[in-house]
Image: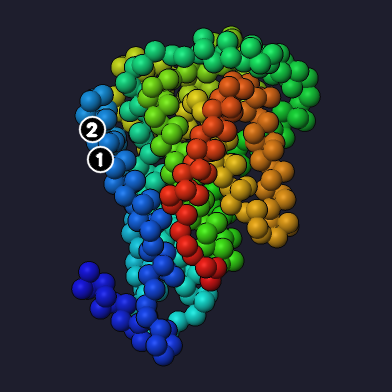
């Protein structure tokens, strides 16, 4: 701590007369500390999970580069504190870098954990999910068959469904540069809670996926389906024990993290220009629709996602909302 205070001394001297250094201005405040604490718990839990399920996480040179990127961003954040001078832009960039570090470390910890959760071998709950869908009067197999009649719609829905990864970066850049700090940290909070909730549900209530249970082909790349199914059966049955970071992909789960993350992105940008928010919102209408129209999720998965995000929003507003003024 003494060393860190020494590094930040130049910034302390350039905040203006009578102005004390405010850590919240560069991303170190109550909610970022809560997110970091959650990640520490997740990391400890992951080690226990891998030990209990005999899973080995294998890292390659590209995965080492991922860790190196986090280290480089941490160095950039430190440098932004240490170099003399100060400006609103500098503080916004520093806060954005801090948020990016937490985002990348969250993904790095949780991505392999889904395989450990699946390897617990809990009974599949597809009968319950399918029954709930029928109770709602919705048949995903029939919806998928209807979608297949329109190749242009299948292509468009695949594009929106595969847009999530680049979308996740957008709020980190836009919100930090716009100085919308409350929205930035609320976004990070919802990503944490959504991932934790999805992992818990995957561990307790795994699913063989609606297209397998109902015996139809989803309207996505066959290679993706084959890889997903191989991993599902291998880890759930205890035949697979090695998680290669290069071969990981998001497993389909109840509730849908894909949907939760897309809605978190859209919600976080709600106060931005309509030229930013509206295209993202339209893309994510397509993304959420794609989960059903391409035959990837039960409708019940989406209802579970709504409950998960609703609980996350309540927790955020009641206990976690930081008192941060826009920069």
| 118 versus 170 height, above or below | above
Q: Is residue 191 visible?
A: no
Q: Position of residue 68 (x, y in %)?
A: 34, 56
Position of 174 compared to 29: left or right? Answer: right
Q: Is residue 323 above or below residue 144?
A: below
Q: Residue at x 35, y 33 (%)?
A: 113
Judging by the rendered image, the residue that carries numbered circle 2 is: 48
Quadrant hosting residue 9: bottom left
Q: Quadrant of residue 177?
A: bottom right
User: Percent from the top left, x then y, of residue 100?
Assistant: 45, 57
Residue lying at 64% horizontally and 33% vertically, measured from the top left? 288
Disc 2 and disc 1: Cα gap in Å?
7 Å
Say which residue appears at 24% left-offset and 36% top-offset: 47
- Identify whether 32 is placed above or below 280: below
Within-10-Å neighbours for mark 2: few <14, some 14–19, many 20+: few
* Viewer-proximal residue among 282 and 301: 301
| Residue furthest out toward the front | 318
CB atoms of marks 2 and 1 within 8 Å: yes
- Specify few, some or many for label 1: CA neighbours under 10 Å numbering under 14, 14-19, or 20 or more: few
Nearer to the camera, 258 or 229: 258
**Which type of secondary structure does the marked residue at label 2 adopt?**
helix
- Give coordinates of residue 321: x percent, y percent: 47, 54
Q: Nearer the viewer, residue 179 or 151?
A: 179
In the image, taking residue 278 as reference, residue 91 lies left or right, namely: left
Q: In the rendered image, is residue 187 in sight? A: yes
Q: Quadrant of the N terminus?
A: bottom left
Q: Which residue in the structure is indicated by mark 1? A: 44
- Side of 227 where 43 appears, left or right: left
Q: Residue at x 62, y 54 (%)?
A: 269
């Amino acid at each position: 701590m003494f060393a860190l205070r020494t590094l930040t001394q130049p910034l302390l001297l350039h905040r203006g007369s009578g102005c004390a250094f405010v850590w919240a201005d560069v991303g170190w405040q109550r909610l970022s500390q809560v997110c970091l604490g959650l990640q520490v718990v997740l990391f400890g839990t992951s080690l226990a999970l891998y030990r209990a399920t005999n899973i080995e996480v294998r890292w390659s040179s590209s995965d080492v580069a991922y860790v190196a990127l986090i280290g480089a961003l941490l160095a950039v954040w430190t440098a932004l504190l240490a170099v003399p001078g100060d400006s609103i832009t500098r503080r916004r960039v520093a806060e954005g870098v801090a948020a990016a570090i937490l985002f990348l470390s969250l993904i790095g910890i949780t991505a392999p954990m889904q395989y450990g959760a699946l390897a617990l071998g809990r009974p599949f709950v597809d009968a319950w999910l399918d029954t709930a869908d029928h109770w709602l009067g919705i048949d995903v197999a029939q919806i998928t068959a209807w979608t297949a009649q329109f190749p242009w719609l299948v292509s468009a829905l695949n594009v929106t469904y595969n847009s999530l990864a680049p979308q996740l970066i957008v709020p980190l850049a836009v919100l930090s540069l716009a100085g919308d700090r409350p929205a930035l940290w609320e976004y990070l909070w919802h990503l944490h809670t959504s991932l934790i909730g999805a992992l818990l549900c995957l561990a307790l209530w795994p699913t063989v996926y609606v297209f397998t249970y109902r015996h139809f082909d989803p309207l996505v790349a066959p290679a993706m389906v084959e890889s997903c199914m191989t991993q599902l059966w291998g880890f759930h049955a205890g035949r697979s024990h090695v998680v290669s970071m290069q071969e990981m992909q998001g497993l389909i789960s109840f509730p849908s993290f894909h949907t939760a993350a897309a809605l978190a992105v859209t919600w976080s940008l709600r106060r931005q220009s309509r030229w930013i928010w509206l295209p993202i919102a339209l893309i994510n209408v397509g993304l959420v629709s794609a989960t059903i129209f391409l035959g990837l999720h039960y409708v019940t998965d989406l209802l579970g996602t709504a409950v998960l995000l609703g609980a996350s929003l309540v927790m955020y507003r009641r206990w976690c909302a930081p008192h941060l003024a826009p920069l």
